[in-house]
Amino acid sequence: MLTLYSKYNRQQVQELFQADYNFKTSTGSWGLHGVIRLPNKQNDWVYFVTYGQSQAGHEFDEGITPDGVLTWQSQPSQGLMDKRILQWINQNPEVDKTYLFLRPNKRSDYYYLGNLNYLRHDADREQPVWFQFQITDFNPGSKLYSEIQGGVVPPLPEVGEKSGKGPLRVEPPIKSSLSNKISTRNFKARKMPDLSGQDTRNKKLGLDGEKFILEQEVQRLNSCGREDLASKIEHTSVMIGDGAGYDIKSYNEDGSQRFIEVKTTKGGINTGFYITPNELAFAELHSKSFVLVRVFNFDDESLSGNYFELDANLEEHVTLTPTNFKASF
């Protein structure tokens, strides 16, 4: 059994995860490789990270922030379309596990630091690809952190990332052309933990996101001189419940109705989300007045974030995948 923040050598880790493997120091996957896919697992991995490494002329610049964000680079030979890169980008944190073992130098054994959840990657750099992962439940204590923090690395660029200047409305992501080439199981939305499953269960996050967008709607109508319409906005999901097919009834400047469904995540711009059959049916029925507002990078302390809008033709923007089936006799 793994013990958080304890030290392990490679053979000890191998014996925990693949007891029948013939371990040889500095050879084979367990003796040499930095990333190992666990046997009989589609997307479970062990990461061995050693600070101060270089390979093929590339010096790895890696480190951990105080809140547990690991900046890490892939092998210099790997590009953005590499199969493994796509698997790491499209990790499902509810199913897939990535175990992090890290040592500050070659002379040390590895500290087990817990599981990694994908946060983001730099879409403009490859060979190697730059990643950031969140280490779950990160609390090593100041003494250990001083040993494992590594280099101070700059944050990776992210489309629509918060600037600290208030809410930012951005253009929606472009639907990936890869969706027809790679199975949905292996290729999900690109950004952050895919927190989509957690988002769905977090009712407070959803409600806070709706209040955030309701405020944006009030400000929008007030700024164009339609205070009369701003005063009529309804928070429908609070007034009559979640079954209406939308969350907020607002208005356009000309007085026409605007039915808004809000989907909120703490993740990045490409985090997937769930939408119900009822919401899809409502969008189709009210195609000229339905708007889906995707709130991302949401800060539940300041109740602020970034957002973009999608019209009712959702399949032009996203790939819709059935996730549940009803079995009937």
Image (cartoon, grey):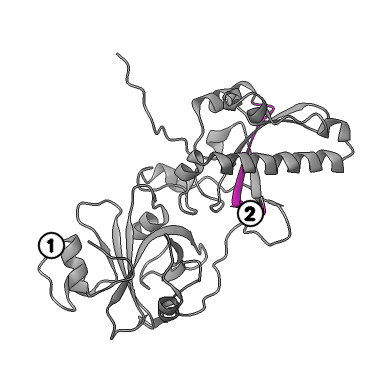
Magenta-drawn stretch contains 264:
no
Residue at image coords 82%, 34%? 230
Q: Amino acid at mark 2?
A: Glu
Q: Which amino acid, by three-letter code, is at mark 1?
A: Ala
Which image quadrant for residue 324?
top left
Q: Check the image and report above or below for 11 versus 18.
A: below
Q: Position of residue 141 (x, y in %)?
A: 43, 73
159 left or right of 319 in image: right
Q: Quick one: quadrant of the N terminus?
A: bottom left
Question: In this view, which residue lies farthest toward the right?
Answer: 225
N-terminal of the two: label 2 or label 1? 1
- The quarter of the rendered structure image containing the C terminus is top left
Give the SS element for disc 1.
loop
Q: Quadrant of residue 216?
A: top right
Task: Assess disc 2: are there few (<14), some (14-19) or many (≥20) residues with their C-alpha within 10 Å of its C-alpha.
Answer: few
Q: Which residue is mark 1?
A: 19
The front one of 58 and 270 is: 270
Look at the image and give the residue range highlighted in magenta: 287-302
The residue that label 2 is drawn on is 301
Q: Residue at x 78, y 26 (%)?
A: 256
Residue 258: x and y in percent read 72, 30
Tell me which secondary structure the magenta stretch mostly adopts: strand
